[in-house]
Image (cartoon, rainbow, N blue to C red):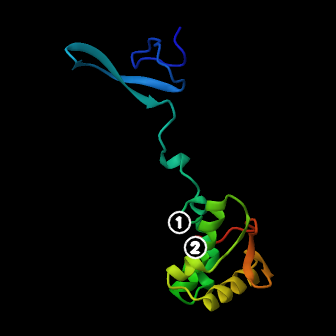
Amino acid sequence: MGNGYEHTDGCSGDAKAPGLIMSNRRFVLSHGKMTEVETLEPAVPRRTATNKTPFEERFIGCPVWWLQGVLPLSRSAFELVVALYIWRRHTVVGRRTFSVPNGELRALGVKRQIKYRTLAKLREAGLIVVRQGGGEAPVVTIRPRRRKYPPF
Protein backbone atom coordinates (compact mmCIF):
# COMPACT_ATOMS: atom_id res chain seq x y z
CA MET A 1 0.00 0.00 0.00
CA GLY A 2 1.28 3.49 -0.85
CA ASN A 3 0.95 6.54 1.36
CA GLY A 4 -2.05 8.35 -0.08
CA TYR A 5 -1.15 8.29 -3.78
CA GLU A 6 -2.44 6.36 -6.68
CA HIS A 7 -1.48 6.21 -10.31
CA THR A 8 -4.02 7.41 -12.82
CA ASP A 9 -4.46 3.75 -13.79
CA GLY A 10 -5.68 3.04 -10.21
CA CYS A 11 -2.54 1.33 -8.87
CA SER A 12 -1.13 2.40 -5.51
CA GLY A 13 2.11 4.36 -5.50
CA ASP A 14 4.81 5.22 -3.02
CA ALA A 15 4.85 8.98 -3.45
CA LYS A 16 5.83 11.07 -0.43
CA ALA A 17 3.04 13.70 -0.15
CA PRO A 18 -0.50 12.59 0.75
CA GLY A 19 -3.50 14.00 -1.10
CA LEU A 20 -2.02 13.90 -4.61
CA ILE A 21 -2.81 11.76 -7.64
CA MET A 22 -0.07 10.54 -9.95
CA SER A 23 -0.59 11.32 -13.61
CA ASN A 24 1.36 11.80 -16.82
CA ARG A 25 4.00 9.05 -16.34
CA ARG A 26 7.01 9.45 -18.63
CA PHE A 27 10.74 8.81 -18.79
CA VAL A 28 13.47 11.45 -19.11
CA LEU A 29 17.19 11.16 -19.71
CA SER A 30 19.06 12.75 -16.81
CA HIS A 31 22.82 12.42 -16.23
CA GLY A 32 23.00 9.51 -18.69
CA LYS A 33 20.21 7.54 -16.95
CA MET A 34 16.57 7.03 -17.86
CA THR A 35 14.40 8.16 -14.96
CA GLU A 36 10.66 7.67 -14.57
CA VAL A 37 8.91 10.98 -13.88
CA GLU A 38 5.31 11.43 -12.82
CA THR A 39 3.49 14.73 -12.60
CA LEU A 40 1.56 15.22 -9.36
CA GLU A 41 -1.85 16.87 -9.39
CA PRO A 42 -3.89 17.84 -6.32
CA ALA A 43 -6.62 15.35 -5.45
CA VAL A 44 -8.97 18.31 -5.04
CA PRO A 45 -11.80 18.86 -7.48
CA ARG A 46 -11.39 21.80 -9.82
CA ARG A 47 -13.79 24.69 -9.38
CA THR A 48 -16.91 24.43 -11.44
CA ALA A 49 -19.90 26.70 -11.85
CA THR A 50 -21.64 24.82 -9.03
CA ASN A 51 -18.89 25.25 -6.39
CA LYS A 52 -17.80 28.84 -7.08
CA THR A 53 -17.11 31.24 -4.24
CA PRO A 54 -20.31 33.25 -3.59
CA PHE A 55 -20.21 36.65 -5.28
CA GLU A 56 -20.14 38.73 -2.08
CA GLU A 57 -17.19 36.70 -0.73
CA ARG A 58 -14.97 37.26 -3.79
CA PHE A 59 -12.06 39.70 -3.60
CA ILE A 60 -11.29 42.85 -5.58
CA GLY A 61 -8.45 43.97 -3.32
CA CYS A 62 -11.02 43.52 -0.57
CA PRO A 63 -14.18 41.45 -0.23
CA VAL A 64 -16.95 42.51 -2.57
CA TRP A 65 -19.22 43.20 0.41
CA TRP A 66 -16.68 45.75 1.75
CA LEU A 67 -16.44 47.44 -1.64
CA GLN A 68 -20.23 47.52 -1.91
CA GLY A 69 -20.38 49.19 1.49
CA VAL A 70 -17.73 51.85 0.83
CA LEU A 71 -18.37 52.66 -2.82
CA PRO A 72 -21.55 54.68 -2.23
CA LEU A 73 -19.75 56.68 0.48
CA SER A 74 -16.76 57.61 -1.68
CA ARG A 75 -17.00 61.00 -3.39
CA SER A 76 -13.46 60.81 -4.76
CA ALA A 77 -10.83 58.31 -5.76
CA PHE A 78 -8.84 59.32 -2.66
CA GLU A 79 -11.70 58.35 -0.35
CA LEU A 80 -11.91 55.00 -2.09
CA VAL A 81 -8.14 54.60 -1.68
CA VAL A 82 -8.50 55.19 2.08
CA ALA A 83 -11.25 52.57 2.34
CA LEU A 84 -9.20 50.01 0.38
CA TYR A 85 -6.10 50.87 2.43
CA ILE A 86 -8.04 50.22 5.64
CA TRP A 87 -9.02 46.75 4.41
CA ARG A 88 -5.44 46.06 3.26
CA ARG A 89 -4.04 47.16 6.63
CA HIS A 90 -6.53 44.87 8.40
CA THR A 91 -5.33 41.97 6.22
CA VAL A 92 -1.61 42.74 6.65
CA VAL A 93 -1.72 43.09 10.44
CA GLY A 94 -4.04 40.09 10.75
CA ARG A 95 -6.37 41.74 13.26
CA ARG A 96 -9.67 43.58 13.18
CA THR A 97 -8.20 46.42 15.31
CA PHE A 98 -5.19 48.39 14.07
CA SER A 99 -3.76 51.90 13.74
CA VAL A 100 -4.11 53.96 10.55
CA PRO A 101 -1.00 56.16 10.25
CA ASN A 102 -0.68 58.92 7.65
CA GLY A 103 2.64 57.85 6.09
CA GLU A 104 1.57 55.19 3.58
CA LEU A 105 -1.53 57.17 2.61
CA ARG A 106 0.59 60.30 2.12
CA ALA A 107 2.77 58.30 -0.28
CA LEU A 108 -0.40 57.64 -2.30
CA GLY A 109 -1.24 61.36 -2.40
CA VAL A 110 -3.92 61.20 0.29
CA LYS A 111 -4.01 64.16 2.69
CA ARG A 112 -4.81 63.50 6.34
CA GLN A 113 -8.00 65.57 6.12
CA ILE A 114 -9.30 63.15 3.48
CA LYS A 115 -8.33 60.22 5.71
CA TYR A 116 -10.25 61.66 8.69
CA ARG A 117 -13.27 62.53 6.53
CA THR A 118 -13.34 58.99 5.11
CA LEU A 119 -12.96 57.42 8.56
CA ALA A 120 -15.95 59.47 9.74
CA LYS A 121 -18.05 58.28 6.78
CA LEU A 122 -17.13 54.64 7.34
CA ARG A 123 -17.92 55.02 11.06
CA GLU A 124 -21.32 56.60 10.31
CA ALA A 125 -22.09 53.75 7.89
CA GLY A 126 -21.36 51.24 10.66
CA LEU A 127 -18.43 49.60 8.88
CA ILE A 128 -15.77 50.59 11.43
CA VAL A 129 -15.29 51.86 14.97
CA VAL A 130 -12.68 54.62 15.42
CA ARG A 131 -10.73 55.57 18.56
CA GLN A 132 -8.85 58.84 18.31
CA GLY A 133 -5.71 59.22 20.39
CA GLY A 134 -4.27 62.57 21.37
CA GLY A 135 -1.66 63.19 18.69
CA GLU A 136 -1.45 59.51 17.70
CA ALA A 137 -2.77 57.67 14.66
CA PRO A 138 -6.45 56.72 14.97
CA VAL A 139 -7.15 53.11 15.92
CA VAL A 140 -9.76 51.42 13.72
CA THR A 141 -11.76 48.27 14.33
CA ILE A 142 -13.48 46.72 11.33
CA ARG A 143 -16.95 45.63 12.35
CA PRO A 144 -18.23 42.21 11.28
CA ARG A 145 -20.37 42.14 8.20
CA ARG A 146 -23.95 42.89 9.27
CA ARG A 147 -26.01 42.34 6.19
CA LYS A 148 -25.81 41.38 2.57
CA TYR A 149 -25.25 44.16 0.14
CA PRO A 150 -27.06 43.83 -3.17
CA PRO A 151 -24.84 42.77 -6.07
CA PHE A 152 -23.79 45.57 -8.36
Image height check: is 104 above or below 45?
Answer: below
Residue drawn at 19 percent across, 14 percent down: 32
Tag on residue 79?
none
| Side of 147 where 43 appears, left or right | left
Q: Residues within 10 Å of mark 2 (few under 14, many from 20)?
A: some
Tag on residue 61?
1
Residue drawn at 66 percent across, 65 percent down: 90
Residue 58, quarter of the rendered image: bottom right
Residue 92, quarter of the rendered image: bottom right
Looking at the picture, how far across and down is residue 115, in whole percent? 63, 85
Looking at the picture, how far across and down is residue 76, in whole percent? 53, 89
User: Gap between marks 2 and 1, in whole Å?
Assistant: 7 Å
Amino acid marked by disc 2: Leu
Tag on residue 84?
2
| Viewer-closest of 112 and 45 | 112
| Side of 10 where 71 appears, left or right | right
| Viewer-closest of 92 and 143 | 92
Image height check: is 61 above or below 51?
Answer: below
Under circle 2, the secondary element is helix
Q: How crowded is mark 1: few (under 14 residues within 10 Å), some or many (20 or more)?
A: few
Looking at the picture, how far across and down is residue 120, in whole percent? 72, 86
| Side of 27 where 128 appears, left or right | right
Mark 2 and mark 1 residues within 8 Å of each other at the beta carbon:
yes
Residue drawn at 63 percent across, 72 percent down: 86
| Viewer-closest of 115 and 77 | 115
Residue drawn at 65 percent across, 77 percent down: 101
Quadrant of the frame with the C terminus: bottom right
Name the outermost residue toward the top: 1
Looking at the picture, how far across and down is residue 37, in whole percent? 32, 20
Please tell me which of labels 2 and 1 falls first in the chain. Answer: 1
| Viewer-closest of 51 and 72 | 72
